[in-house]
Amino acid sequence: MKVLLFGASGMVGRGVLRECLLDPGVESVLSVGRSATGQRSEKLEEVVLSDLANLTPIEDRLRGHDACFFCLGVSSAGMSEADYRRTTFDLTVAVAQTLSRLNPALTFAYISGAGTDSSEHGRTMWARVKGQTENALLRLPFQGAYMFRPGITQPLHGIKYKTRGYRIGYVVMGPSLPLVKALFPNAITTTERVGRAMIRVAREGAPTPLLGTREINRLGT
């Protein structure tokens, strides 16, 4: 399986990249992002672009892939809805439209979030925009499209949150995670399980296009 990975320098993306490089069934990974991952592997090729909404310069390199794992994302904290929509909806859909044209047999897996609003009309801004993004992706002519909606995602294997606020929150919350896992096993997943679940969905598909933490943990075991 040949994989395209967007956002491999972020927390979730790093976890997905790790699992792809470890999986013997993944033949190659083409990482596309605004910064390099710093990883080295015979499987890995990297493209660094300042404008990810314009993939025209690298279109030839994007052909012939079996799956795209889209892990790009930003926190909505302090952002207007217009700005958040540009960095979430506009960018994601622009990339996906290009890939659907170049690779009609592609499986597209998108990191969304627990609480995403599929109705697109709820009160929470980020949830509305994520819902709009998911719905737009599901309308594209991919072989399969899957929306991953993890809740709390625990970084493993030395991976850390990229956003300072999340890093601080994790330090504070970290000691209580075992108790939270015991009481609410379907509220927490890990970067490892997300990566493994994405690979499995690309190979086998899933019963539903919307995958919450429970489904991610099941698919990622």
Image (cartoon, helix red, strand yellow):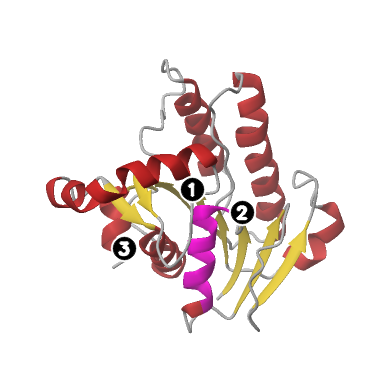
Disc marking residue 219? 3
Residue 160 image offset from top left, x and y in percent? 48, 55
The chief SS type of the magenta part is helix
- Asked if marks 1 and 2 touch (Cβ < 8 Å), the reply is yes
Q: Is residue 169 left or right of residue 91?
A: left
Callout 2 secondary element: loop
Residue type, label 2: Gly
Query: Is residue 19 one of those drawn in magenta?
Result: yes
> Residue 26: where, in percent of width, then height?
53, 78
Classify residue 114 by image quadrant. Answer: top left
Looking at the image, which is closer to me, 92 or 15?
15
* Residue at image coords 45%, 67%: 199
Residue drawn at 20 percent across, 51 percent down: 181
Crowding at label 3, few (<14), some or many (≥20) Cα neighbours within 10 Å? some
* Residue situated in front as seen by the camera: 35 or 6: 35
- Residue corresponding to mark 2: 7
Kindly report which numbered mark, 3 or 2, lies closer to the viewer in this rendering: 2
The amino acid type of the residue labelled 1 equals Ile
Which element is circle 1 on? Answer: strand
Task: Depth check: give the residue in front, 33 or 157.
Answer: 157
Question: Closest to the observer: 10 or 169?
Answer: 169
Disc 1: CA contacts within 10 A as few (<14), some (14-19) or many (>=20): many
Q: CA distance from mark 3 to mark 1?
A: 15 Å
What span is colored magenta in the figure? Answer: 10-21
Relative vertical location of residue 5 with respect to residue 97 in this rendering, above or below? below
> How many numbered discs sit on the rendered protein?
3
Q: Which residue is mark 1?
A: 111
| Mark nearer the N terminus (1 vs 2) | 2
Q: Is residue 69 magenta?
A: no
> What's under tag 3, amino acid-wise?
Leu
Left or right: residue 202 versus residue 58 is: left
